[in-house]
Each structure stands twice: as C-alpha cells, then as structure tokens.
Amino acid sequence: MLPIRLGTVNADGPQELFVFALSRKGRIETTNYRTVKLPTGTELPPYVENEFPDFYRAMFDRLVEREKMSVVFLEYFWDMGWCDPCAAEPLNNQEMRQLGVDWLKGEDAARPGTDEIYLTRLHVRYDAEHFPEDLIFQETRDRENFQGRYVLRHAWTGQADCDAARDYLKALPKRRDEWNRNLAKLTGWPIGQIRERAAAFPEKKPPAGE
C-alpha cells in the first residue's frame, strides 16, 4: 500500500505521482483503481520529435480528463534481463540490490540473466475528490513487455524511379493526414494548427548517393 491521501491535505491542486516497482513474477497494478495502459504504437507527424514534452503532457492531460481522474496509468513494464528496443539500459545487479532487490544471486554488475526481475512504471494524477483511498498494489503474472511508444516516419525524398516509389509518393499525402489526425485525437490540439506545423517541418534529406 502507498499512502496518497496525506498528499492532498495541503495540496494546491492535483498531485502528480510516479511509481517505480521491481517485482519477481510480473507486472504491478493497483487493486482498488483500474490500471490502464497508455496508447502506444501510434504514428505521428515527424515534427513531434522537437516538441515531445508538450505532446506527452497534452496527451496525458486528455487521458486523465477522459478517464475522469479515476485510473492509474501504466507507462512502462519490462523484463530487466534484456531490452529491444531500449528506452534506457536495464538496471544492473548492483543497482537493483541498492534498490532493495534481495533475491538476486551473485554480486556482479551484469544483467540479472536467469533471475527474473521486472520493472513497472505507473503514473497517476490525483486529488482528494477523485482518489478517496490510498493505492493498493498487487503483483500479477502478466509478463508481456510494454512501453508507451510513438512512431515518427520521415518521408522518402530521394529518387522515385520505380513503380513502388511512385505509388508511395502518391499515397503519402493521405498517410500524412492520418498522422495529423492521430495527433489531434491524442492531444485535442486543433487539426488545422497541426497541419500547419507539420507542413512547415523540413523533410530530412536521404544519405548521399541514395
């Protein structure tokens, strides 16, 4: 259990809480509130790479509003024995021991290997009205890796001297508009503003000789 009610006594508005949990059997979730995964795998316009913090805040604000500030969000869950793709290098044995993982075997700083260790990251925005109880957690048997992931595709700007390339360029405006609509749906930003910013973003040039 994690007490959060104390944080609302003198709070000036909603509080932001991140929970990092290391476990042995699987993903951590809350039992007295729903645990909801972030949207993931969505294709967005490339200009978001320069404004990712703003995008993420806007998306999270919209999710909290949609769920009426009543759920805990799962942002990340991964097996610390490997990573592909890596958002960051997995914790090594020494780091995990310092964090209280007392079931590890060996003292080396290598990855845990056969010792199963999972990292869960939860994100919750709460206030006294919407979260009347402290958080209660349970360890599940769910071991499916998860991370909030957003795909930015840079359009090909090289030679288009084959049928496949010409078909690709013909379909590109529709795909770009889908990326823009995805961003509007996730954030609530005006679609017209998104289209303007996307159109102004410079295309990356292909490597020399391609």
Image: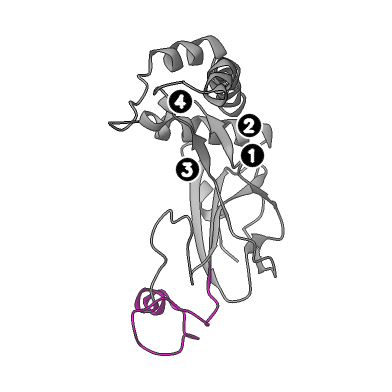
Residue hosting label 2: 65
In the foreground, 12 or 33: 33
Residue hosting label 1: 69
Determine which quarter of the picture holds residue 178: top right
Identified at 36% across, 74% down, the residue is 95
Q: CA distance from mark 1 to mark 4?
A: 38 Å
Q: Are marks 1 and 2 in contact (CB under 8 Å)?
A: yes
Q: Is residue 53 visible?
A: yes
Mark 3: amino acid: Ala
Mark 4: amino acid: Ala
Vertical side of 150 occupied by 143: above or below: below
Mark 2 or mark 3, whichever is nearer to me: 2
Q: Earlier in the sequence, mark 3 or mark 4?
A: 3
State the image coordinates of residue 106 (x, y, percent, origin top left): 40, 90
State the image coordinates of residue 163 (x, y, percent, origin top left): 57, 22
Vertical side of 30 occupied by 103: above or below: below
Q: CA distance from mark 2 to mark 4?
A: 33 Å
In the foreground, 114 or 34: 114
Q: Residue furthest left?
A: 208
Q: Are marks 1 and 4 in contact (CB under 8 Å)?
A: no
Q: Which residues are magenta?
A: 93-118
Residue hosting label 4: 155
Disc 1 secondary structure class: loop
Mark 2 or mark 4, whichever is nearer to me: 4
State the image coordinates of residue 32 (x, y, percent, origin top left): 72, 57
Mark 3 or mark 4, whichever is nearer to me: 4
Structural crowding at the residue carrying mark 3, measured as other residues with C-alpha within 10 Å and reported as few (<14), some (14–19) or many (≥20): few
Q: Are marks 2 and 3 in contact (CB under 8 Å)?
A: no
In the foreground, 163 or 84: 163
Q: CA distance from mark 3 to mark 4?
A: 46 Å
